[in-house]
Every structure is written in structure tokens, then in C-alpha cells.
Amino acid sequence: MPRNSCSTRTSTSGPFWEETDVLIGNVLLALAWAALQGQFSLGTLATGYLLGYVVLLGLVRGGVLKRSTYIGKAHLIAGLGCFFLWELIRANLRLAFDVATPRFQMKPGIIALPLDVTEDSEILLLAMLINLTPGSVALDVSDDRRVMYVHVMYISSPDDARAEIKLGFERRILKLFR
């Protein structure tokens, strides 16, 4: 009767463990970085986490590690977060300028936004990002989930407002979820 090899994985096999192995590896690399630096502060751990991610990304792209959704999607999440922060700052500056100047710049309107996102989670994320950005509010989604109605405070044309949302938030959400 052959003996079991040490290299076979019986209790931790499957897609869940393959994904968490990479995440755990990233956390361990962050802890190792903090230990090498001699201090366990949030900044040191964050730096170690980013450096660990870059190392793991190189190992996946080099073919040493299997492809992982953790490695493939993390930069998309970061990109969406950075884009949201940029839009948040831009919208706040626009509103602050409009409040601080005597001339009224707002041109409010409601647009019907045809949706390319179809899943509830995608629609929810899009609505949340629109609502969190000053100057826009997601009002409703049609029963067939193909159209979202959005109130926009600065609208030059309905097509421009649609394009700004579709090419900004919706495009990044589609990349992240599909």
C-alpha cells in the first residue's frame, strides 16, 4: 500500500484555499516587512502590504504562482477607489466654487441613464458611488433594471452627463465585476 505524499493537499484543496493562500501570503509578506523595519505601525504594514502585492503580482505574471482573482482584481478596486476620490474632490471644488461666487452656475436636471450593469450588486455600487459624489443623486431604477434615473446639478447636455457616468463609474464597475 503506497504512503501518502507530503505534497498532496487533502484538507485545504479547492478554489477557496487557492485564493486565500495568496491573500495570506500577502499578509505574511507585510508582517515580514514590518519586522525587518523594526516597527509595527500602520504605515509600515501598509507599505509591506503594497510591496508584497507587487511581489506576488510579479510571481503570478512570471508563471511561478497560479492566476488568482485576488491579484487580478485588487488593482481594479484601487483604481475605482482612486477614481472615486478624484471625482469626490472635483465635485466638492465645483460646489464650493459655485457657493463662493456670486453667479449661479448650477443647471440641474434629471437624466435617464441606460444601464450596462445588470446584477444587483453592480447596480447598488453604481448608485452608491453616484449618491456619494456631491451634485448627483440616483433617484430610481426601472422595474426591468435597464434604466437608472439620476438627478445631476451641473448638466450641460443629457448626453454629456450620461457619458460622464458611463465612462467613469460604470465602466470601472463592469471591469471589476466581470
Image (tube, helix red, strand yellow):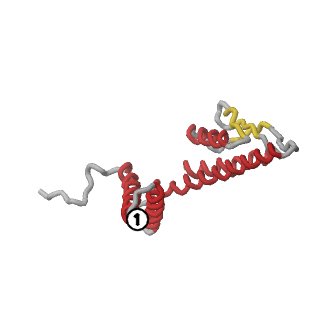
- Amino acid identity at mark 1: Gln
Foreground of the two, 73 or 4: 73
Label 1 belongs to which residue?
37
Furthest-bottom residue in this view: 62
Furthest-right residue in this view: 103
Q: Secondary structure at mark 1?
A: helix
How far from the left and from the top, in percent, is residue 81?
A: 59, 51
How far from the left and from the top, in percent, is residue 87?
A: 68, 50
Classed neighbour count for the residue bearing mark 1: other residues with Cα under 10 Å, few (<14), some (14–19), many (≥20): few
Foreground of the two, 90 or 65: 90
The answer to whether residue 19 is left or right of residue 140 is: left
The answer to whether residue 70 is left or right of residue 118 is: left
Residue drawn at 46 percent across, 67 percent down: 58
How far from the left and from the top, in percent, is residue 103?
A: 88, 44
Q: Is residue 7 above or below residue 95?
A: below
Furthest-left residue in this view: 1
- Rendered image quadrant of residue 44: bottom left
The answer to whether residue 158 is left or right of residue 3 is: right
Residue drawn at 69 percent across, 36 percent down: 138
- Rendered image quadrant of residue 140: top right
Q: Is residue 123 above or below residue 93?
A: above
Foreground of the two, 157 or 143: 157
Residue drawn at 64 percent across, 53 percent down: 83
- Rendered image quadrant of residue 128: top right
How far from the left and from the top, in percent, is residue 137?
A: 70, 37
The answer to whether residue 168 is left or right of residue 81 is: right
